[in-house]
Image (cartoon, rainbow, N blue to C red):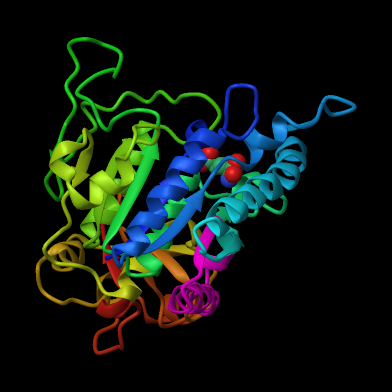
Amino acid sequence: MRIVVKVGSNVLTRADGMPNVTNMSSLVDQIATLRSLGHEVILVSSGAVACGRGAITPSRQLDSVSARQLYSSIGQIRLINLYNQLFAGYGLVVGQVLTQKENFASRTSYLNQRACMLTMIENGVIPIVNENDTASLTELMFTDNDELSGLIAAMVDADTLVILSNVDGIYTGLPADPGSRLIPEVAPGRDLSEYVVASKSGFGRGGMGTKCGIAGKVSDEGITVMIARGDRPGVLVGLIETPGEVPHTTFLPSPQPLSNVKRWIAHSASFAKGMIQVDARAEEALRSDRAVSLLPIGITSVDGEWEEGDIVSIIGPEGARIGVGRASMSSEETSTAIGQRGQRPVVHYDYLYID
Ligand code: GLU
């Protein structure tokens, strides 16, 4: 199995901002076990900012971007050094992948990033991935490393994404509430919004809300997602080998997995350069089970400027988003073709993702 493991800042760092060596050693030990059982592992590790925070007191009050840049520059090398040492104890080689949102924006840079990861995996190197927080700007950041781990799982065609957090999974209420129950299994397409309280804990950027959103999306794409508590002894090996014995939430994969291109498009909505509004008939056709492309005849208006190959959002007559796709003509060409019959598709079915 190819497994992407995402570990949150709360598991990897202590309250005082020092690396949590106990938790890190246990995870490395378990990843080494998974490797010896024949699995491939890609690690998405947070903790750079949290770890850097414990190492330095800035000379003056910093804005949030500068603080993140400073802390991550210090914390990332501490973390990676520790990982390198710990994995070396098992004779395993690790490599660092620092990435940012732009690398997922165009198909060319996406495929380049993917090729790098696959070469590492093919050579038995364990990729340790994090956002390049020294270069990211607030508006161009991943929502959090949960989003990043979903993108990575889709990118490397993982079988399973494991998200290790500081709670056992998704609960029917607040985890601390005695009346709350852990939800063991979530069927594809099931909406959990009634349960998820938009609260987050400690140092990381994510929370159960984003975890649920990402898990839903990634499992819809055909990848199993498991959310569990990272500091439970043996949790990782348990989830993969004897899942029935470990408290957690599994999001079951959709029986109709998406193609690699569609997965990329599904995660690309935030890169959309423009919007295409369609009429009710086109919306119905696009939402049907048939393989329908977006044709100029169904378009009522366009907004924004884009080139052929850019990502565009598709919205219905009421203004709600229907999906996202890769445009096969520019905004200018699309505007000229609006409403016309017999034209080539503006978004071909293969490059279309309906929400
Ligand atoms: N990239 C951030 C870090 O390493 C973590 C982002 C998150 O909390 O999800 O500190």
Image quarter where the C terminus lies is bottom left
Tell me which corner region of the image, top left, top right, bottom left or bottom right, holds residue 41: bottom left
Residue sitting at x 32%, y 45%:
236
As rendered, which of 285 and 170 lies closer to the eye?
Answer: 170
Tell me which corner region of the image, top left, top right, bottom left or bottom right, holds residue 220: bottom left
Residue at the outermost right position: 59
Q: Is residue 63 above or below residue 7?
A: above
Residue sitting at x 16%, y 31%:
183
Q: Is residue 326 above or below residue 52?
A: below
- Is 206 colored magenta in this rendering? no
- 148 lies left or right of 264: right
x and y percentages locating residue 212 in the rendered image: 30, 39
- Prevalent SS, magenta region: helix
x and y percentages locating residue 211 in the rendered image: 35, 40
Which region is colored magenta?
Answer: 103-129
Image quarter where the N terminus lies is bottom left
x and y percentages locating residue 166 in the rendered image: 40, 29
